[in-house]
Amino acid sequence: MKPINLIIIGAPAAATTLVKAALLSGVLMAFAPGIVLGQPIEKKGTTPYVTHFIFRPLMNIDIADLGTATALEAVGTTENMKGEKMFDKMSAHCTALSVASGDKKYIDGACVLADNDGDKIFSTFDTRDVDKSQPDMGCGTHIITGGTGKYAGITGSEPFACIAMPALSGPGGYTAMDIPHNTTWEIK
């Protein structure tokens, strides 16, 4: 019988400890959310980041002397070049159409960036839309059209450059490219 009494006597102490821990957690979240929940993201800003991409051709139309159209999938990760939280360590997944016909050569598409919480940023891009005020970002521009979770209400513009990487080995026509962005965004 004694062990049962000890369990009954010990239960109120365990419950008191649990209540104290819950209260302390609540106080920390109320007065120091940056420490408990991580630093909040900025609502507006400009930052440089690079996406390290692998491109995979999905389908190709190739008519000799007339042109080609290639559907591409791109996957990669992002790296904020200032070490900031925004646009850092996100997964990137894009779909694109690459067209080359006569003097027309362009790539259009859309991308989604996802963070560790599963929150997403959606953008479209066009390599014909070049921000001439940023000559180092002369490959095209992403237009941020929205987001989910903490990025709900985000809009912005991302002029970007294209830096070809060494050819990948093996079959499949895979290519690699670093895409530096100079992003200006706002979350309303």
Image: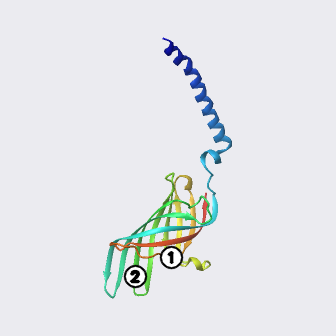
Q: Residues within 10 Å of mark 1 (few under 14, many from 20)?
A: few
- Residue 108: percent from the left, percent from the top? 45, 73
- Residue 140: percent from the left, percent from the top? 52, 75
Q: What colouring style does the render use?
A: rainbow
Residue closest to the eye, 149 or 171: 171
Q: Residues within 10 Å of mark 2 (few under 14, many from 20)?
A: some
Q: On screen, 5 above or below 67? A: above
Q: Which of the numbered marks, if any, corresponds to residue 35?
A: none
Mark 2 in CB contact with mark 1 (< 8 angstroms):
no
Is residue 131 at all visible to an observer of this figure? no
Amino acid at circle 2? Ala
Quarter of the image holding residue 50? bottom right
Residue closest to the eye, 155 or 138: 138
SS of the residue under disc 1: strand
User: Which residue is tagged 2?
Assistant: 100
- Residue 186: percent from the left, percent from the top? 61, 61
Q: Who's the residue at 53% across and 75% down the image?
A: 161
Instruction: Please indicate whether residue 175 sits to the left or right of residue 146 in the image.
Output: left
Is residue 103 at all visible to an observer of this figure? yes
Residue closest to the eye, 99 or 48: 48
Instruction: Please indicate whether residue 125 sits to the left or right of residue 29 in the image.
Output: left
Q: Which of the numbered marks, if any, corresponds to residue 163?
A: 1
Q: Who's the residue at 50% across and 72% down the image?
A: 178
Q: On screen, 85 above or below 81? A: above
Quarter of the image with the C terminus is: bottom right
In the displayed orientation, state which residue is furthest to the top.
1
Give the spatial CA distance, label 2 vs label 1.
Answer: 19 Å
Q: Identify the mark nearer the N-term, 2 or 1.
A: 2
Quarter of the image holding residue 75? bottom left
Q: Who's the residue at 36% across and 77% down the image?
A: 69
Residue depth check, mark 2 versus mark 1: number of the one nearer the observer: 1
Amino acid at circle 1? Ile
